[in-house]
Image (cartoon, rainbow, N blue to C red):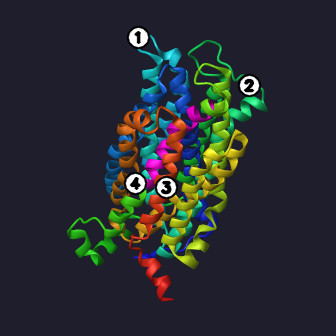
Amino acid sequence: MDKHKKTLSFWQIWNLSFGFLGIQFGFALQNANASRILQTFGANVEHLNWFWLVAPLTGMIIQPIVGYYSDRTWTKLGRRRPFFLAGAILTSLALIAMPNAPHLASFISPMFIGGGMLMIMDASINISMEPFRALVADKLPEEQHTLGFSVQTMLIGIGAVIGSWLPYILGNIFGISKEAANEGEISPNVIWSFYIGAFVLISSIIWTVVTTKEYPPQFYDEEEKKDEKIQKKFTIPKTMIQLLVVQFFSWFALFSMWVYTTPAIASRFYGTTDPHSIQFQEAGDWVGILFGIYNGVSAIIALSLPLIAKRIGRRSTHALALSIGGLSFLSFFLFKNDTWLILPMVGVGIAWGSILAMPYAMLANSIPAKHMGVYMGLFNLSITLPQITNGLLGTVLFKHVYNGNPFNAILAAGICMILGAFSTYFVDDKLDKRIVKQ
């Protein structure tokens, strides 16, 4: 099939992935600020994992459904674009509503309204995210898959850097207050960050909708005739099953990082566990900077991934990146000043850049193009199931394995990441075999 697809220029690939910049902008605001927002609304640190379960649960349900219907939907906008446009509108509304939960609470606790907005935001992001993954595979020939997902990773990194840093920038450079007017409310610098995130998200999605055209349904109908044996029986490719193990360890680790980094840094370096204190808010702003760093690194290294993969193969590239990420998590305990955490975050960024590109590049070559959306949606289970597992076990792990110390969760994430690196070598990648033969 790939021989019939046109090779796209760098800027054409940029345009078809540009909407992901906005999606990740909003996702980064959520990742860096959701824990402190929920704690401000009254959530206990050992129960944060329950709120964070919303993201993988909604993703597990929504992405396969969206993938299935996006494969079968044809409109004037194509088959993928209507879905990520609808998701962008809903996500933007949730971004505006979430930090304003106290003003929306008449009979329900702001904590539950905030959790509800988190659920809506995650559901909406998932509506947009899956079609973008499928769109890259739809549009690009096989030899450009690694480049396509790497450009997508670069744009994800750019959006995430700005989104993660925005509360800090607004509070420390533009002088917008970092203290809430009343206890239990969110500080203005965070609220305005969410407003700006909503605007960036919808604008970037519209850019991709306007600048990118999809192949007509006839294109896939013709190709389906050539793949009749594949299409008659729906099967899960061996490569996808093998990647599930790699993804499990990777995303189990990432979930721990997103949930526990803010309380871990606040308690270890700022000497507070009180989410209403100015020290806790400063810790939250610094976590935003650190998260921006790892996302920025992923954007920088993204375009080098195809070059490295071409020399040593995609499996070895991914294994190396995950190993660096795992060792970086383990190195957290070496530092006594939170400024030095910039160094391990560089390593985490290398792993993150590969996680966003390499598994999808390996997968795209092993699944039928006619059903790219539903397969990509099903592959999202490799992201959601490890997070759900972490979330369900989180309270038990926090009390009995981490000894009530969120910092220990970060160290456990390092071990998981290294296990993911080891399991990468068991993945069957056809393109890697060609590199070896050459």
Tag 1 residue: 107
Instruction: Name the kind of residue labelled 1 in the image.
Output: Phe
Q: Earlier in the sequence, mark 3 or mark 4?
A: 4
Instruction: Name the kind of residue labelled 2 in the image.
Output: Ile
Tag 4 residue: 248
Q: Is residue 171 left or right of residue 284?
A: right
| Residue at horizontal 58 percent and vertical 17 percent from the top | 185
Q: Can you give x and y, in whole percent of width and height, for residue 380 in the image? A: 38, 53
For the record, the magenta segment spans 248-266
Instruction: Name the kind of residue labelled 3 in the image.
Output: Met
Q: Earlier in the sequence, mark 1 or mark 3?
A: 1
Element on which disc 4 rests: helix
Q: Is residue 341 left or right of residue 94?
A: right
Tag 2 residue: 176
The Cα–Cα distance between marks 3 and 2, rounded to whole angstroms, is: 38 Å
Element on which disc 1 rests: loop
Q: Are marks 2 and 4 in contact (CB under 8 Å)?
A: no
